Each structure stands twice: as C-alpha cells, then as structure tokens.
Image (cartoon, helix red, strand yellow):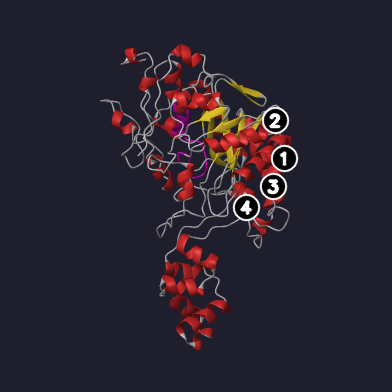
Amino acid sequence: MWSHPEGAWPTADDARQSRVFSPVRLGPIWARSRTWVPAMVPWRATDGGNVTPELLAWYGRFADGRPGTIVVEATGIRDVKSGPLLRIGHDRFIPGLRRLVETVRERSGGETRLLIQVIDFLKVRRRPDPKRYFDRYLDLTARHRAALAELLSDDGWRDATDGDVREKLSGLDDDAWAQVLDGRELESLRRGHRERVTDTHLPHIAELPRVLPGSFADAAARARRAGFDGLELHFAHAYTMASFLSRMNDRTDGYGGSLEDRARLPLEVIRSVRRRVGDDWCVGARFLGDEAIDGGSPVEDACFFARAFARAGVDFLSVSKGGKFEDARQPAVGAAVYPYTGPSGLECMPTVRVDAPGPFGRNIPLAAAIRRAVRADGRCVPVVASGGLCSFGQMEEILARGLADVVAAARQSLADPDWWEKIRSGRGSEVRRCAYTNYCEGLDQRHKEVTCRLWDREFAPGEGAELSRDGRRRLVAPRWDSRLPSSDEGER
C-alpha cells in the first residue's frame, strides 16, 4: 500500500505566487490557473444522450472549486444509441449543452474554462451464453463442420443440418471450442464481439476515414454554438481514434501500418475541425503516452504523434496511458468487456496497490518525454499531465521541473471538488484525500452513477442529499462552507 506524497499545504500567499495557480495559455484562450479536471463519465445523461438536472449538478459541483479548466465527459459525435452517455451528434443536443455551459460559468463565477471531450467508438457486444452465441451469432461454414468432424472423429458432421451442428457446438467445452473456432470467433464467445478499425471487410469500418473528419468537425461546430471555450479530441484508450494510432493497426488502405499512416486520420480530423471552427477557438487532443499492452505503441510513437499534432495546430496535448480492450478481464456472461480492468487499465488508473513506483505521478515521465519532443521541435504547445496527482508540492514540482505545463486530477477532484479552492485559500489541510481504491471506477464499469465512497461519510442530520437510483449513495459531494473558520489554523 502506498501513502499520499508528503508535503505541507501552502498558505494563501504561497498559493497565489505558485506555478500551480499561475495562468496558462491554451491557444486563443487563457486559463486562470494550471489546475485541470479531466473528463470523467458520470452516467447521468438520459438514455437518449441529453443533459439532465443530475448532470448539471455534477459539473456545477466541480465548478464550485474553480479549477482553471474542466473537461466535460466523453461525448459521442454520432447520433446513435449509446446508453446514458452524453451526445453531440445532432443539433437537438445544443440547448442542453448550452445549459451545461451556463451552469459552470455561474457556479465558477466565470473563472473556469469549460471544454468538451468528443469521442467516436465502435460496437461492443455483451458476452453471450454459449447457446445464444452458437444459435444466433456464429456464421456457420464448412470449416466449422470439418473441424467438428475431425474433433469427434465422425465425418457425418460434415453433412449434418445447421441446427444439429449448432446444438452440438453449444454443448462442447472451452478446450473443444478452441479447436473449432478461429481466434476472433473464440474471442466473441469468451468476451463478446468487438469491432476493430482493421475490420475493413465491413463497409462502415472501411469508410471511417471518409466519415469521421466531418463528424468531428460537426461536433466541434455544435460545441462552439453551445458556448464551450473549446474541445478535446479523444484520441486515447480503447476507442476509434486511438485504435488508428495503435501499432496494432495494420490497415492497408493508407490509414495503418507505418507511423505516418497511423497518424493520417487523426491529423485529418484535427485539420477538419480547425477549418470548421477557425483559429480563435481552443482545440486540443488527449492521447496515449504508452498503450501499455503487448505489441502496442510505446512513448516513442507518442512523441512522433505529439509533434505531428502540434504542427497541425492543436492548442494543448493531454497525456494518458493504457486503458485498452486487449488485456481487459473476461466479463461475466451478459456483461460487456471493460477496457480498464486489465494491466493497461491499472496503468491508466493506478491504485494504492499498484507496484513500484506507486500510483502518485506514475505517468509523469510520459508527459515529460512528450513535452521535450514538442519543445525540441520548436513548439510551445502546453502538455497536460495526469495520473495520481493529489498534493500541492507534487504538482508544483512537476511544473517547476518542466515535466508538464498543466496538472490534472480526476479522482482527487471527485473526492473533493473544492480541493483547488481550499488549497488556493490556504486551507489545504481541509482537503478530503482520495483513497485511490477505484471505488468510482467499479461503478463506472457497471454503468452506475459514479460517486465517491468518501462522500457518504459526511451526511449531516436533515441534509436531504439527493441519492443514486439504488438509494445507497449520494449523487453530489458534500458542500464546503468556505465562510467557516478552519479547524486547524495553527497547522498551516
């Protein structure tokens, strides 16, 4: 188990003079400080992808802490069903998104910049039970019949009816299935079918390079109309754009294979967005410093991509790590595979149980390498670092050493949305410290409203806090009354 980084909280005067609370330029805009709340999906939108009062309360609560920048959750750019995930694939979403912008402006006193993260993703099916898989999903061919006949030493299976073959296959064990099914079929049975960007035999996958630049540009235009200060292109983790960047992308149509070809579609997206919204609106990208999977892209690839993105005109580079489907745990029957459950997921959101060097600042070397590469290319695009950032001294050192330009904290901000304001006002000793157990991630995995287990320890008599659908958890962090005197003034 790892402990929080040591170090005293600053006085209000020290905080005012710090790098953490100094302004930073993000292309055409300035953020008041270098404090950043990254995108987190809270599962509070409607099933149709619309903004709800619960979602407004979620972002309003982060705005209370007045960070320099908040990034709204991964928001789907296509007008397709995606459960309670926010969407921006049609003009009908603009009014709700505009209310979200207005809420954050009001709650932060106009001090927080608001960006929206936009994402594309491919289809992922839930893991089926074997009978359902063999009855409905397996495309039965002569190859399966021949493999079954060989397995059972009975050539009669080569001419058996489809129904009989499917019934027989569903009754076999896992070792037998491995002898009859190919790799993708076996994966679909064991983990649920998952589309890949390399499935170019599917017309809608082959056409992604033609479709996505315009779809991202349309989303950016809607975000600008809704009043956001800018957007973050989601090029990270297990999703479409990250998959184009991956070394595992071996498409042969000019959009896979070499570094240059893997970067081609993301660069076309950046240029399409920039043409649509102009140079006077903030456009950045979040991408992986390391895929952290066998055969995946390492930091050297990330440095190449960062230089290319900077040349194409992005206004910031936000660095993450891992979070891939390839090494995720096998889901239960009826559940979908979740890309943050395997080793690469642990690298993305390390807990206090992770191996050395521990969870706090574990991924900073990636941001530092990317920043050096971009600076060596003669560009000053700010780099946003994240991953277990939870103390003032830790963040100030990162900035002082030039390892990053902006410090981002998701889980710590979830544990205490006021923590930035507490530090700035010299009351850091009142910060509610994240325990880094990933309680929140477990809820996200099950598509439940994301909350923090620390919140429920602070119910006040008669408070009447709004609860989650299961009635067990509060939906909003406890309020902090900054007018009350600190309980330990002398410790500062």
Identify which amino acid the numbered label 2 is placed on: Arg
Is residue 242 left or right of 429 when viewed as pictured? right
Residue 379 is labelled as 2
Magenta residues?
42-61
Name the residue: 58% across, 34% down. 368
Identify which amino acid the numbered label 3 is placed on: Leu
- Mark found first going from the N terminus, 4 or 2: 4
**Location of mark 3 (residue):** 265
Q: CA distance from mark 3 to mark 2?
A: 22 Å
Please indicate, yes or no, whether residue 214 appears anywhere in the rendered image: no
Residue 3 is labelled as none
Q: In this rendering, which labeled residue sits more in front, label 4 or label 1?
A: 4
Q: In this rendering, which labeled residue sits more in front, label 2 or label 1?
A: 2
Q: In this rendering, which labeled residue sits more in front, label 4 or label 3?
A: 4
x, y percent for residue 211: 69, 49
Q: In this rendering, which labeled residue sits more in front, label 1 or label 3?
A: 3
**Location of mark 1 (residue):** 272
SS assignment at label 4 = loop
x, y percent for residue 491: 33, 15
Q: Are marks 2 and 1 in contact (CB under 8 Å)?
A: no
Q: In this rendering, which labeled residue sits more in front, label 3 or label 2?
A: 2
SS assignment at label 1 = helix
Is residue 307 left or right of 441 when viewed as pictured? right
Identify which amino acid the numbered label 1 is placed on: Ser
Residue 247 is labelled as 4
Please indicate, yes or no, whether residue 8 appears anywhere in the rendered image: yes
Q: CA distance from mark 4 to mark 1?
A: 24 Å
